[in-house]
Structures are given as C-alpha cells and as structure tokens.
C-alpha cells in the first residue's frame, strides 16, 4: 500500500496544484502549547534520565508523545489541509545541540516523517480524489552563516556553510527515509543558510537516487520588507531560483495584513508556484496571537481572488479552526497562473538587478 500511495501522491501533486489552491496546515507549536506539557511529558520513558532539561524541545515529542503529534496532524487534515508539515522545525543536529541531542536528530526526523505519512495515508484512503502530502521541514537552525552573533566583531560566525550542509543533508536523508513527499525549506531569514540547505537537499537527492519537489519559504522580518540578512523579497527569490523550486513563498513574522505586499512582490516575478502561510496577526503583550480564523481567511481569500497564491496556510498562532476557515474561503477560486517571462539576466545582492 505504501509504495503505491507514495508514487500516486507525488505524481498527482503538480496536477492538483493546477486545478485548485492547495491548503497547507497551520502551526504545530501553537497546538503543542495548548497541552501545557511539563518536563516529564517531554522526557517520556525514553529520556527520563536525560542529563539536562528538555522541556520546549517540541521536535522530541515525535519520540516521547507520538500520539499527540499524530492527532495534531489529523486535526489539520480534518480541517482540509492538503499538505501537512513534519514536526522537525528544529530537528537538525545544529539546533538539537541546545539539548545535547545531536545524536538523536536522525531518529527524530525519521519518526516525524513516518508519523505525518501515517496520517496523510489514512486521509488519502478516505478521500482518494484528494490525496494528502507530507512536507519534510528543514528549519533555519538557530545559527546564521552570514550574520555575526557579536556586535563588536562583525566578522565572527557561529556556524560555517559546510557545517550547515552536513546537518541539512542528514536531516533530508532521514525525512526521505521516513516517507516525505516534498522537502520544505521554511522560515528562511538568512540566504546563506538557505543556499546551504538547497545544496544539501540536491546532494542528498543524488545520493539516494530520488528527487522530491522542494518548497522554499522565506521570512520578511519587519516593515523594512527584508529578510534578516538584508535582502528584499524579490532579491531573495533571485538568489534561490536556480534550484527550480516547486513553490516559493513567505511565512512567519507578519500577519496577513502586513505580509500581503511582499507576497504580491514575489507573485509578480516568480516562475514557480507561490505559497504563503502568515502568522495569525502580530503577538500581543502576552506573546499570544489574536487574529481569529474568519479574519485571517478574509485576507487570504482576497489574495486568492487577486491571483497571488497557489498554496496557503498558517504559521504562528494558527490552528485547525484557522485552516478550516481558510480552506472554505479559497474553495473554488482558481490558483495563480504562472506567467511567461521574457528571458533576462536576473541577479541579486541585497537588491534585485534585472537587465
């Protein structure tokens, strides 16, 4: 059953994207927080004697609380998600170093992909006309290759390109082993990190003899309209277009009201599908998100009616209720048509250069 469903799902992905706007899931962390898990919940039996605190290591829950993570996936699929993301945002060896769990990174990635795949296959069987897909998530890591962590030493770096490639390669191979249908480079704030991830992904595809669609999703950090490493949205796209992504988009940091102009910017120049999964507004003074599903859905419906998007979902603060409202709002609206572009030289530094 697994192999048949795998090949069928991947073969139908591009076709489905042409027919309708695809629905991405919402926030995993927001849903985990609802359960108010304690240190012992994170440890489970497997890590009961671990030498440091692990509370907050949400990725570890695929090993210690798999039923909880599986149910969250199912809740998003019930809400109408076509694509669910693995719970691996911080599962690289680099990010796992915060908990001295580098050696467990591979197990987490494999288990996370298997959990999401199990849920996706169950719902694909329920709705054969609407297969569900798993995006194996590669997060940005908690280090940056092009920005100094020390304001007094601009040349200092806390990670190298090669270290990032090694970490991303290990995660990518594990996600593929676990059954991911796509690979998503998510919440990218440093283009050099993204280039390391892209290089690692393509290198891994060659190694395992399998190529999956790749989604690239960057983050505009504030009203400056730039990533943390300084690029405009258009410049960032030109920096990544060489990998011929399945989709390119933006997520996190901003709510839909503030993110729209940047989605419009990349939709105008992108030669691939456009994805967007904004936050549920901006966090309030308590760090919580106040934008309800109907309001968020109204924004994304307008984006869809304006022909800006092919894939939509939610990031921080979003829930299955948000995703259900979004799915209903964009149902029946035609997806963005990828325009034909005149061949030109398209370069980028912090700004784009097209000639």
Image: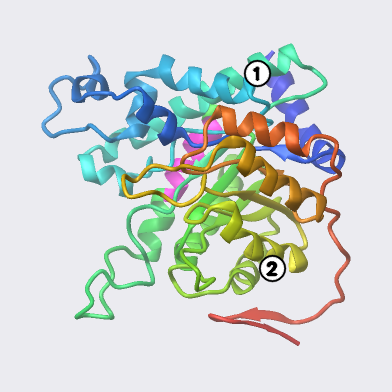
What colour scheme does the image use? rainbow
Horizontal relation, residue 112 to residue 329: left or right: left
Residue 209 visible in the snapshot: no
Q: Nearer the viewer, mark 1 or mark 2?
A: 2
Residue 212: where, in percent of width, then height? 66, 42
**What is the chief secondary structure element of the magenta stretch?**
helix
**Number of disc labels:** 2
**Most foreground residue, 192 or 70:** 70
- The structure residue drawn at horizontal position 71% and vertical position 33%, both measured from the top left corner, is 327
> What's the distance in space between the residues labelled 1 and 2, CA to CA?
35 Å
Give the SS element for disc 1.
helix
CB under 8 Å between discs 1 and 2 = no
Binning the other alpha carbons within 10 Å of mark 1 as few (below 14), some (14 to 19) or many (20 upward) gives: many
Q: In the rendered view of the protein, which quadrant contains the N terminus?
A: top right
Give the SS element for disc 2.
helix
Which corner quadrant of the image does residue 73 belong to? top right
- The structure residue drawn at horizontal position 46% and vertical position 63%, both measured from the top left corner, is 221
Which corner quadrant of the image does residue 170 belong to? top left
Which corner quadrant of the image does residue 67 belong to? top left
Image position of 66 with respect to 340: above or below: above
Image position of 13 with respect to 145: above or below: above
- The structure residue drawn at horizontal position 28% and vertical position 70%, both measured from the top left corner, is 157
Residue 86: where, in percent of width, then height? 51, 33
Residues in magenta, as a range: 168-177
Which residue lies under the disc numbered 2? 265
Inspect the magenta stretch and tell me whether residue 222 lies in it. no
Dot 1 or dot 2: first in sequence order is 1
The label on residue 121 is 1
Residue 293: where, in percent of width, then height? 59, 36
């Amino acid at each position: 059953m697994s192999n048949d469903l795998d090949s069928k799902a991947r073969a139908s992905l591009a076709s489905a994207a042409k027919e309708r706007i695809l629905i991405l899931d919402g926030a995993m962390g927001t849903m985990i927080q609802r359960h108010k898990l304690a240190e012992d919940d994170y440890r489970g039996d497997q890590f009961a004697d671990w030498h440091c605190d692990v509370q907050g290591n949400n990725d570890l829950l695929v090993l210690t609380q798999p039923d909880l993570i599986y149910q969250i996936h199912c809740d998003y699929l019930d809400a109408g998600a076509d694509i669910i993301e693995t719970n691996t945002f911080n599962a690289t060896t680099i990010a796992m170093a915060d908990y001295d769990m580098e050696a467990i990174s591979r197990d987490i990635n494999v288990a996370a992909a298997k959990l999401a795949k199990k849920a996706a296959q169950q719902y694909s069987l329920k709705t054969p006309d609407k297969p569900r897909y798993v995006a194996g998530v590669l997060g940005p890591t908690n280090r940056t290759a092009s920005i100094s962590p020390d304001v007094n030493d601009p040349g200092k770096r806390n990670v190298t390109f090669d270290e990032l490639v090694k970490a991303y390669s290990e995660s990518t191979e594990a996600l593929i082993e676990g059954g991911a249908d796509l690979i998503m480079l998510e919440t990218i704030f440093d283009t050099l990190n993204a280039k390391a991830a892209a290089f690692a992904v393509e290198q891994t595809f060659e190694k395992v003899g399998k190529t999956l669609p790749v989604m690239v999703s960057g983050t505009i950090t504030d009203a400056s309209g730039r990533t943390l490493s300084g690029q405009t949205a258009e410049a960032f796209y030109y920096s990544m277009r060489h990998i011929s992504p399945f989709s390119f988009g933006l997520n996190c940091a901003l709510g839909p009201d503030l993110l729209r102009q940047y989605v419009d910017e990349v939709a105008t120049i992108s030669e691939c599908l456009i994805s967007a999964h904004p936050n549920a507004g901006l966090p309030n003074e308590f760090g919580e998100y106040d934008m309800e599903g109907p309001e968020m859905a109204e924004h994304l419906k307008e984006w869809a009616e304006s022909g800006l998007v092919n894939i939509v979902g939610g990031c921080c603060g979003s829930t299955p209720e948000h995703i259900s409202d979004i799915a209903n709002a964009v149902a029946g609206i035609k997806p963005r048509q990828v325009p034909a572009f005149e061949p030109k030289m398209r370069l980028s530094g912090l700004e784009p250069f097209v000639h």
